[in-house]
Amino acid sequence: MAGRDAERIASLFWWMLGAAVVVWLAVMGLAVFALHAPHERQSRKQVQLLVVGGGAAVPTVLLVILLVFGLREVPGLLNPGSEDGVQIHLRGERWWWRVRYELPDGSQFELANEVRLPVGTRVPLWLESSDVVHAFWVPSLAGKVDLIPGRVTRLGLEATRPGRFRGVCAEYCGLSHAAMRFEVVTSPPREFERWTRAQKRASREPSSPVARRGRALFTSVGCGACHTVRGTPADGEIGPDLTHFGARARLGTGAPNDVRGLQAWLRAPGRHKPGVNMPGYDALSSRELRSLAGYLRGLQ
Ligand code: CUA
């Protein structure tokens, strides 16, 4: 566990489970007693007391206690966090997550399938969907929240330790629902700030000849019609922003973000994510795909 809300949910679960076990044992004990107790010795009054007490009074009192106990956690779970700090806007797309950061200084940047959080601060997430209902769920951090077209839902995320955590879409949303993964990276506040500073910058100039060839290809095959790379003419908004693509640990499929995985993805995205909007580039040679992947990996 690495989130305040996950801790709340887990402790609630264990208390409820404990209470359920105690009640189950008591009921089983009574059942065994009823089977073996001599019938004729029980008066009518005793039987009535057992039915009214054990059948109505005790369950009512117990359920009210558990309800109050559960409701106590609700304000904490619903707390969306402060609107003065970093804000994260999440949009469910056709099987990927658009993640836009809004910083207190007014600057913004966008990434995909990765959410970064500082440890110890409750960060507000504003969730929307472009098409159908998705659900954002990072079990290690918090409960799930639906992304509903035409509505904005909210979630506060508070990480308690640094690490990397898997997130999934938890609402069936079409062909590649199961491949709609993402990663949450939590880090100490200083490191998080360093990361936001790096993300705000425009993309870096490619340093190697391979990457330069890749950038030329990126432009000539028209990647910029769908993708943005800040600092270059590429300003498409349909697909993920790739300005700092190389800094992400994983591809949108959950596979490691390396040259091999990228080449396979570029060749036939539909094989890894059926129904995805991105076309395949199997017309490019392996060498061309390698340079394209090299350019993208270099976008740190
Ligand atoms: Cu998005 Cu399931």
Image: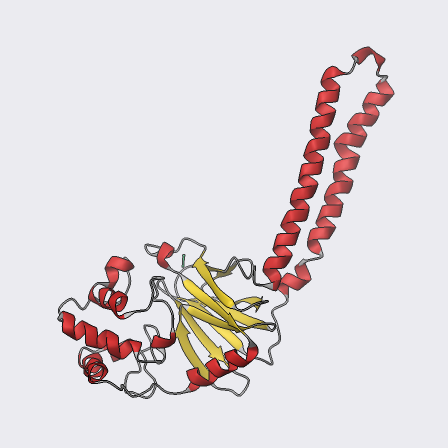
Q: Quadrant of residue 221?
A: bottom left
Give the number of marks: 0
Residue in front for this viewpoint, 151 or 32: 32
Q: How is the image coloured?
A: secondary structure
Compared with 10, 279 (above or below) is: below
Q: Residue at x 30, y 76 (%)?
A: 297
Residue 13 position within the rendered picture, expressed as x and y whole percent measured from the top left: 63, 49
Q: Residue at x 72, y 52 (%)?
A: 69
Residue 260 position within the rendered picture, expressed as x and y whole percent measured from the top left: 25, 67
Q: Quadrant of residue 226?
A: bottom left
Taking the image as drawn, is residue 151 in sight? no
Taking the image as drawn, is residue 263 in sight? yes
Residue 119 position within the rendered picture, expressed as x and y whole percent measured from the top left: 57, 72
Q: Is residue 21 left or right of residue 222?
A: right
In the image as oriented, which residue stretches furthest toward the top? Answer: 40
Compared with 76, 227 (above or below) is: below
Q: Residue at x 56, y 78 (%)?
A: 189
Residue in front for this viewpoint, 189 or 79: 189
Compared with 136, 39 (above or below) is: above
Q: Is residue 18 left or right of residue 285?
A: right
Looking at the image, in which quadrant does ligand 1 appear? bottom left
